[in-house]
Protein backbone atom coordinates (compact mmCIF):
# COMPACT_ATOMS: atom_id res chain seq x y z
CA UNK A 1 0.00 0.00 0.00
CA UNK A 2 1.24 3.47 -0.85
CA UNK A 3 0.75 6.12 1.80
CA UNK A 4 1.75 9.46 0.30
CA UNK A 5 2.94 12.44 2.25
CA UNK A 6 0.73 15.00 0.55
CA UNK A 7 -2.65 14.83 -1.16
CA UNK A 8 -2.47 17.64 -3.69
CA UNK A 9 -3.82 15.64 -6.62
CA UNK A 10 -6.88 14.54 -4.67
CA UNK A 11 -7.43 18.04 -3.40
CA UNK A 12 -7.54 19.54 -6.91
CA UNK A 13 -9.04 16.56 -8.76
CA UNK A 14 -12.20 18.60 -9.34
CA UNK A 15 -10.26 21.27 -11.20
CA UNK A 16 -13.25 22.64 -13.12
CA UNK A 17 -14.58 24.53 -10.13
CA UNK A 18 -11.24 26.33 -9.69
CA UNK A 19 -10.86 27.01 -13.40
CA UNK A 20 -14.43 28.32 -13.47
CA UNK A 21 -13.55 30.82 -10.75
CA UNK A 22 -10.43 31.90 -12.64
CA UNK A 23 -12.36 32.17 -15.93
CA UNK A 24 -14.92 34.41 -14.25
CA UNK A 25 -12.19 36.55 -12.69
CA UNK A 26 -9.70 37.04 -15.55
CA UNK A 27 -11.84 39.31 -17.79
CA UNK A 28 -12.00 41.83 -14.91
CA UNK A 29 -8.26 42.49 -15.33
CA UNK A 30 -8.24 43.23 -11.58
CA UNK A 31 -4.89 41.43 -11.14
CA UNK A 32 -3.08 43.69 -8.66
CA UNK A 33 -4.54 44.07 -5.17
CA UNK A 34 -7.87 43.10 -6.72
CA UNK A 35 -11.25 42.56 -5.09
CA UNK A 36 -10.77 38.79 -4.58
CA UNK A 37 -7.64 39.59 -2.54
CA UNK A 38 -9.57 41.94 -0.29
CA UNK A 39 -12.23 39.28 0.17
CA UNK A 40 -9.60 36.64 0.93
CA UNK A 41 -7.86 38.86 3.50
CA UNK A 42 -11.19 39.47 5.24
CA UNK A 43 -12.10 35.79 5.27
CA UNK A 44 -8.63 34.75 6.43
CA UNK A 45 -8.94 37.22 9.32
CA UNK A 46 -12.22 35.55 10.30
CA UNK A 47 -10.61 32.11 10.05
CA UNK A 48 -7.62 32.87 12.24
CA UNK A 49 -9.37 35.34 14.55
CA UNK A 50 -7.28 38.41 13.78
CA UNK A 51 -8.84 41.75 12.82
CA UNK A 52 -6.30 42.91 10.21
CA UNK A 53 -4.76 40.75 7.49
CA UNK A 54 -2.36 41.78 4.74
CA UNK A 55 -1.62 39.42 1.84
CA UNK A 56 2.02 39.22 0.80
CA UNK A 57 4.12 37.15 -1.58
CA UNK A 58 5.17 34.40 0.88
CA UNK A 59 5.42 33.46 4.54
CA UNK A 60 9.08 34.46 4.38
CA UNK A 61 8.14 37.94 3.16
CA UNK A 62 5.49 38.14 5.87
CA UNK A 63 8.25 37.71 8.46
CA UNK A 64 10.70 40.08 6.76
CA UNK A 65 8.16 42.87 6.24
CA UNK A 66 6.81 42.52 9.80
CA UNK A 67 10.26 42.88 11.32
CA UNK A 68 11.48 45.63 9.01
CA UNK A 69 8.41 47.82 9.41
CA UNK A 70 9.00 47.75 13.20
CA UNK A 71 12.61 48.79 12.71
CA UNK A 72 14.46 45.49 13.12
CA UNK A 73 17.72 45.79 11.22
CA UNK A 74 21.53 45.80 11.31
CA UNK A 75 22.99 45.88 14.82
CA UNK A 76 19.95 44.16 16.35
CA UNK A 77 19.77 40.63 17.69
CA UNK A 78 16.62 38.56 17.21
CA UNK A 79 16.02 35.45 19.31
CA UNK A 80 14.50 32.34 17.78
CA UNK A 81 14.95 28.57 17.86
CA UNK A 82 17.10 26.37 15.60
CA UNK A 83 14.19 23.89 15.52
CA UNK A 84 12.48 25.44 12.52
CA UNK A 85 12.41 25.62 8.75
CA UNK A 86 15.31 27.69 7.49
CA UNK A 87 12.99 30.53 6.37
CA UNK A 88 12.49 31.81 9.94
CA UNK A 89 16.19 32.41 10.37
CA UNK A 90 16.69 33.52 6.77
CA UNK A 91 14.03 36.18 7.31
CA UNK A 92 15.84 37.52 10.39
CA UNK A 93 19.12 37.60 8.44
CA UNK A 94 17.42 39.36 5.52
CA UNK A 95 16.52 42.28 7.80
CA UNK A 96 20.24 42.69 8.55
CA UNK A 97 19.76 41.59 12.18
CA UNK A 98 21.70 38.73 13.81
CA UNK A 99 19.79 35.54 14.64
CA UNK A 100 20.39 34.30 18.21
CA UNK A 101 19.28 30.78 19.04
CA UNK A 102 17.56 29.32 22.09
CA UNK A 103 16.96 25.59 22.46
CA UNK A 104 13.57 24.02 21.84
CA UNK A 105 11.51 22.01 24.33
CA UNK A 106 9.60 18.76 24.18
CA UNK A 107 6.90 20.10 21.80
CA UNK A 108 9.48 21.31 19.22
CA UNK A 109 8.88 24.99 20.11
CA UNK A 110 11.19 27.50 21.81
CA UNK A 111 11.85 26.79 25.49
CA UNK A 112 10.64 29.92 27.31
CA UNK A 113 12.79 29.14 30.36
CA UNK A 114 15.95 29.56 28.26
CA UNK A 115 15.15 32.86 26.56
CA UNK A 116 16.22 35.20 29.38
CA UNK A 117 19.83 33.97 29.24
CA UNK A 118 20.05 34.81 25.54
CA UNK A 119 18.96 38.45 25.94
CA UNK A 120 21.68 41.09 25.52
CA UNK A 121 21.53 44.90 25.25
CA UNK A 122 21.28 44.40 21.47
CA UNK A 123 18.25 42.11 21.58
CA UNK A 124 15.35 43.73 19.76
CA UNK A 125 12.86 40.94 19.21
CA UNK A 126 11.80 37.34 19.75
CA UNK A 127 10.44 35.18 16.92
CA UNK A 128 8.69 32.16 18.48
CA UNK A 129 7.85 29.53 15.85
CA UNK A 130 4.61 27.62 16.20
CA UNK A 131 6.47 24.67 14.74
CA UNK A 132 4.56 21.68 13.36
CA UNK A 133 1.31 23.52 14.17
CA UNK A 134 1.92 23.49 17.93
CA UNK A 135 1.69 26.86 19.71
CA UNK A 136 4.71 28.12 21.66
CA UNK A 137 4.14 29.18 25.26
CA UNK A 138 3.04 32.66 24.23
CA UNK A 139 1.73 33.99 27.56
CA UNK A 140 5.16 33.38 29.12
CA UNK A 141 7.04 34.74 26.12
CA UNK A 142 4.83 37.83 25.91
CA UNK A 143 5.32 38.52 29.62
CA UNK A 144 9.08 38.26 29.31
CA UNK A 145 9.10 40.41 26.18
CA UNK A 146 7.06 43.08 27.94
CA UNK A 147 9.38 43.10 30.94
CA UNK A 148 12.47 43.36 28.72
CA UNK A 149 10.87 45.75 26.18
CA UNK A 150 11.27 43.37 23.26
CA UNK A 151 9.11 43.01 20.17
CA UNK A 152 7.51 39.65 19.38
CA UNK A 153 6.81 38.39 15.87
CA UNK A 154 5.02 35.05 15.74
CA UNK A 155 6.05 32.65 12.99
CA UNK A 156 2.68 30.97 12.43
CA UNK A 157 3.57 29.70 8.94
CA UNK A 158 2.73 26.16 10.07
CA UNK A 159 -0.06 27.15 12.43
CA UNK A 160 -3.09 28.42 10.51
CA UNK A 161 -6.07 28.28 12.89
CA UNK A 162 -3.98 27.06 15.84
CA UNK A 163 -5.00 28.36 19.27
CA UNK A 164 -3.88 28.51 22.87
CA UNK A 165 -6.52 28.76 25.59
CA UNK A 166 -9.00 29.78 22.90
CA UNK A 167 -6.79 32.64 21.67
CA UNK A 168 -5.55 32.36 18.09
CA UNK A 169 -1.88 32.14 17.16
CA UNK A 170 -0.98 35.74 16.43
CA UNK A 171 -2.76 37.17 19.48
CA UNK A 172 0.39 37.95 21.42
CA UNK A 173 2.91 39.37 18.97
CA UNK A 174 3.14 42.50 16.89
CA UNK A 175 2.23 40.30 13.94
CA UNK A 176 1.77 36.67 13.00
CA UNK A 177 3.15 35.41 9.69
CA UNK A 178 1.30 32.73 7.76
CA UNK A 179 2.29 30.73 4.67
CA UNK A 180 0.04 29.53 1.84
CA UNK A 181 2.73 27.31 0.29
CA UNK A 182 1.14 24.34 -1.56
CA UNK A 183 1.89 21.97 1.33
CA UNK A 184 0.42 24.17 4.05
CA UNK A 185 -2.90 23.55 5.79
CA UNK A 186 -4.49 26.27 3.62
CA UNK A 187 -2.65 26.25 0.34
CA UNK A 188 -2.75 28.00 -3.00
CA UNK A 189 -1.25 27.20 -6.42
CA UNK A 190 2.01 29.01 -5.85
CA UNK A 191 3.78 30.85 -3.06
CA UNK A 192 1.77 33.18 -0.89
CA UNK A 193 1.67 34.54 2.62
CA UNK A 194 -0.33 36.67 5.01
CA UNK A 195 0.44 38.94 7.92
CA UNK A 196 -2.13 39.07 10.70
CA UNK A 197 -2.10 41.77 13.35
CA UNK A 198 -4.29 43.27 16.07
CA UNK A 199 -2.94 46.77 15.36
CA UNK A 200 -4.86 48.89 12.83
CA UNK A 201 -1.93 51.30 12.66
CA UNK A 202 0.60 48.58 11.90
CA UNK A 203 -1.78 47.03 9.35
CA UNK A 204 -2.05 50.34 7.53
CA UNK A 205 1.73 50.69 7.35
CA UNK A 206 2.14 47.09 6.16
CA UNK A 207 -0.45 47.63 3.42
CA UNK A 208 1.71 50.45 2.09
CA UNK A 209 4.99 48.61 2.71
CA UNK A 210 4.03 45.58 0.58
CA UNK A 211 3.14 47.94 -2.29
CA UNK A 212 6.13 50.29 -2.72
CA UNK A 213 4.85 52.60 0.03
CA UNK A 214 2.24 53.92 -2.42
CA UNK A 215 -0.54 55.95 -0.78
CA UNK A 216 -2.16 56.38 -4.18
CA UNK A 217 -1.02 56.18 -7.80
CA UNK A 218 1.28 59.21 -7.54
CA UNK A 219 2.32 59.62 -3.89
CA UNK A 220 4.74 57.50 -1.88
CA UNK A 221 4.74 57.63 1.92
CA UNK A 222 8.02 55.71 2.35
CA UNK A 223 10.12 53.33 0.29
CA UNK A 224 8.81 49.80 0.30
CA UNK A 225 8.68 46.39 -1.30
CA UNK A 226 6.68 44.80 -4.06
CA UNK A 227 5.31 41.85 -2.10
CA UNK A 228 1.63 41.64 -2.95
CA UNK A 229 -0.26 38.39 -2.64
CA UNK A 230 -1.24 37.57 -6.21
CA UNK A 231 -4.97 38.17 -6.75
CA UNK A 232 -5.13 34.99 -8.89
CA UNK A 233 -3.95 33.06 -5.84
CA UNK A 234 -6.57 34.80 -3.73
CA UNK A 235 -9.22 33.46 -6.15
CA UNK A 236 -7.97 29.95 -5.36
CA UNK A 237 -7.75 30.78 -1.67
CA UNK A 238 -11.36 31.99 -1.64
CA UNK A 239 -12.53 28.63 -2.99
CA UNK A 240 -10.50 26.70 -0.40
CA UNK A 241 -10.89 28.74 2.74
CA UNK A 242 -14.42 27.53 3.48
CA UNK A 243 -13.16 23.97 4.00
CA UNK A 244 -10.06 24.81 6.06
CA UNK A 245 -11.76 24.27 9.43
CA UNK A 246 -13.07 20.87 8.36
CA UNK A 247 -9.64 19.84 7.03
CA UNK A 248 -7.99 21.06 10.22
CA UNK A 249 -10.36 18.95 12.30
CA UNK A 250 -9.49 15.95 10.10
CA UNK A 251 -5.78 16.49 10.72
CA UNK A 252 -6.42 16.75 14.46
CA UNK A 253 -8.43 13.50 14.27
CA UNK A 254 -5.63 11.66 12.44
CA UNK A 255 -3.11 12.90 14.99
CA UNK A 256 -5.27 11.73 17.87
CA UNK A 257 -5.46 8.24 16.37
CA UNK A 258 -1.68 8.16 15.92
CA UNK A 259 -1.16 9.38 19.50
CA UNK A 260 -3.43 6.68 20.89
CA UNK A 261 -1.77 3.94 18.86
CA UNK A 262 1.76 5.03 19.80
CA UNK A 263 0.90 5.33 23.49
CA UNK A 264 0.70 1.50 23.47
CA UNK A 265 4.29 1.16 22.20
CA UNK A 266 5.97 2.61 25.27
CA UNK A 267 9.42 4.12 24.75
CA UNK A 268 9.82 2.86 21.20
CA UNK A 269 7.89 5.84 19.82
CA UNK A 270 8.01 9.02 21.89
CA UNK A 271 5.10 11.33 21.21
CA UNK A 272 5.72 14.89 22.46
CA UNK A 273 3.64 15.93 25.44
CA UNK A 274 0.46 17.62 24.24
CA UNK A 275 0.27 20.88 26.22
CA UNK A 276 -3.20 21.47 27.67
CA UNK A 277 -5.10 24.33 26.06
CA UNK A 278 -3.28 24.10 22.72
CA UNK A 279 -5.22 23.58 19.52
CA UNK A 280 -2.35 21.93 17.65
CA UNK A 281 -3.21 21.92 13.94
CA UNK A 282 -0.63 19.31 12.88
CA UNK A 283 0.83 20.87 9.79
CA UNK A 284 3.36 18.13 10.57
CA UNK A 285 2.84 15.04 12.71
CA UNK A 286 6.25 14.43 14.29
CA UNK A 287 7.35 11.77 16.80
CA UNK A 288 10.74 10.63 18.10
CA UNK A 289 12.09 7.16 17.36
CA UNK A 290 15.44 5.84 18.56
CA UNK A 291 16.29 3.93 15.38
CA UNK A 292 14.94 6.72 13.19
CA UNK A 293 16.95 6.08 10.03
CA UNK A 294 16.11 2.37 10.10
CA UNK A 295 12.42 3.12 10.56
CA UNK A 296 12.49 5.72 7.78
CA UNK A 297 14.06 3.21 5.39
CA UNK A 298 11.57 0.53 6.43
CA UNK A 299 8.57 2.79 5.86
CA UNK A 300 9.83 4.31 2.60
CA UNK A 301 10.62 0.86 1.16
CA UNK A 302 7.01 -0.13 1.82
CA UNK A 303 5.52 2.97 0.20
CA UNK A 304 4.86 4.97 3.36
CA UNK A 305 6.23 8.43 2.61
CA UNK A 306 7.60 9.35 6.02
CA UNK A 307 10.07 12.25 6.03
CA UNK A 308 12.31 14.17 8.40
CA UNK A 309 11.69 17.87 9.11
CA UNK A 310 14.67 18.42 9.41
CA UNK A 311 17.77 16.31 10.03
CA UNK A 312 20.17 19.27 10.42
CA UNK A 313 19.33 21.96 12.98
CA UNK A 314 19.63 25.49 11.62
CA UNK A 315 22.58 26.47 13.86
CA UNK A 316 24.66 23.65 12.30
CA UNK A 317 23.86 24.60 8.71
CA UNK A 318 26.71 25.98 6.57
CA UNK A 319 24.67 29.22 6.26
CA UNK A 320 24.94 29.75 10.04
CA UNK A 321 28.69 29.15 10.31
CA UNK A 322 29.48 32.84 10.82
CA UNK A 323 27.24 32.90 13.91
CA UNK A 324 29.76 30.71 15.75
CA UNK A 325 27.54 27.96 17.11
CA UNK A 326 28.78 24.39 17.49
CA UNK A 327 27.43 20.91 18.12
CA UNK A 328 26.31 20.58 21.73
CA UNK A 329 25.00 24.16 22.03
CA UNK A 330 21.33 23.12 21.82
CA UNK A 331 21.09 19.55 23.11
CA UNK A 332 17.29 19.15 22.95
CA UNK A 333 17.06 20.31 19.36
CA UNK A 334 20.15 18.34 18.30
CA UNK A 335 18.92 15.10 19.89
CA UNK A 336 15.50 15.62 18.30
CA UNK A 337 16.97 16.14 14.84
CA UNK A 338 18.51 12.66 15.12
CA UNK A 339 15.26 11.03 16.22
CA UNK A 340 12.35 12.84 14.66
CA UNK A 341 10.23 11.39 11.92
CA UNK A 342 7.25 13.02 10.22
CA UNK A 343 4.45 10.62 9.36
CA UNK A 344 1.92 11.15 6.58
CA UNK A 345 -1.39 12.30 8.02
CA UNK A 346 -3.71 11.82 5.03
CA UNK A 347 -3.88 8.30 3.54
CA UNK A 348 -4.77 9.24 -0.04
CA UNK A 349 -2.84 9.00 -3.32
CA UNK A 350 -0.45 11.65 -4.54
CA UNK A 351 0.94 12.45 -7.98
CA UNK A 352 1.37 16.22 -7.96
CA UNK A 353 4.21 16.94 -5.59
CA UNK A 354 6.07 20.11 -4.74
CA UNK A 355 9.57 19.97 -6.14
CA UNK A 356 10.91 22.51 -3.67
CA UNK A 357 10.91 21.08 -0.17
CA UNK A 358 8.17 18.58 0.42
C1 LIG B 1 8.19 27.61 10.15
C2 LIG B 1 8.18 28.28 8.80
N1 LIG B 1 8.51 29.58 8.71
C3 LIG B 1 8.50 30.23 7.54
C4 LIG B 1 8.15 29.59 6.37
C5 LIG B 1 8.19 30.32 5.08
O1 LIG B 1 6.99 30.31 4.36
P1 LIG B 1 7.02 30.41 2.77
O2 LIG B 1 7.47 29.11 2.23
O3 LIG B 1 5.60 30.73 2.41
O4 LIG B 1 7.94 31.53 2.42
C6 LIG B 1 7.80 28.23 6.41
C7 LIG B 1 7.44 27.52 5.17
O5 LIG B 1 7.60 26.34 5.00
C8 LIG B 1 7.83 27.56 7.65
O6 LIG B 1 7.51 26.26 7.74
Image (cartoon, rainbow, N blue to C red):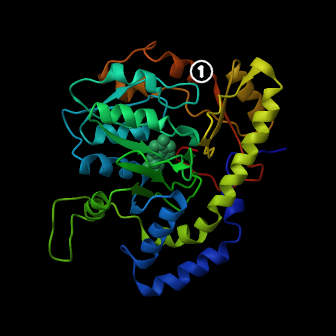
Which quarter shows the N terminus? top right
Name the image quarter holding the C terminus: top right
Question: Horizontally, is 192 left or right of 350 in the view?
Answer: left
Q: Nearer the viewer, residue 27 or 128?
A: 128
The quadrant where residue 125 appears: top left
Reading the image, the residue beneath label 1 is 338
The residue closer to the viewer here, 323 or 296, is 323
Q: Residue at x 25, y 47 (%)?
A: 68
Q: Quadrant of residue 324?
A: top left
Q: How many marks?
A: 1
- Which of these two is toward me, 206 or 309? 206
The structure residue drawn at horizontal position 66% and vertical position 77%, both measured from the top left corner, is 16
Q: Residue most toward the bottom? A: 27
Report the side of 256 relative to 216 (left or right). Answer: right
Asked whether mark 1 lies closer than 8 Å to ligand 1, one says no
Q: How dense is the environment of label 1, judged by Cα within 10 Å: few (below 14), some, or many (20 and up)?
A: some
Which residue is rendered at x = 14% and y = 73% of the image?
219
Local secondary structure at mark 1:
helix
Residue 259 in the image, given as x and y percentages of width and height: 75, 34
The reply to whether residue 4 is in sight is no
Q: Residue at x 32, y 38 (%)?
A: 92
User: Which residue ends up furthest to the top in the rendered image?
Assistant: 328
Give the quadrant of residue 225: bottom left
Where residue 116 appears, x then y in whole percent? 35, 22
The correct choice, above or below, for 260 with respect to 35 in the image is above
In this rendering, the answer to whether 272 lies above or below 255 is above
Q: Position of residue 302 (x, y in %)?
A: 81, 36
- Is residue 57 visible in the rendered image? The answer is yes
Residue 12 at what x, y percent from top left?
66, 65
Q: Is residue 273 above or below residue 243?
A: above
Amino acid sequence: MRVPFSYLDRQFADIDAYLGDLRAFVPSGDFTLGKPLQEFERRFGELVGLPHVIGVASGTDALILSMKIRGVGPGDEVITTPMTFIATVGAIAMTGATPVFVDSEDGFVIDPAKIEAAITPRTKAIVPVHYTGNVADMPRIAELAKARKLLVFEDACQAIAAKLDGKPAGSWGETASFSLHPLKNLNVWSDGGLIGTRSAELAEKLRLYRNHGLMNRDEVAFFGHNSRLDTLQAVIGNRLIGSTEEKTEKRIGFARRYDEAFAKLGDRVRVPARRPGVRHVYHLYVVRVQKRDELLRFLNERGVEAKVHYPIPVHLQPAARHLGYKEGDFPVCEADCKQIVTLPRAPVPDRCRSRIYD
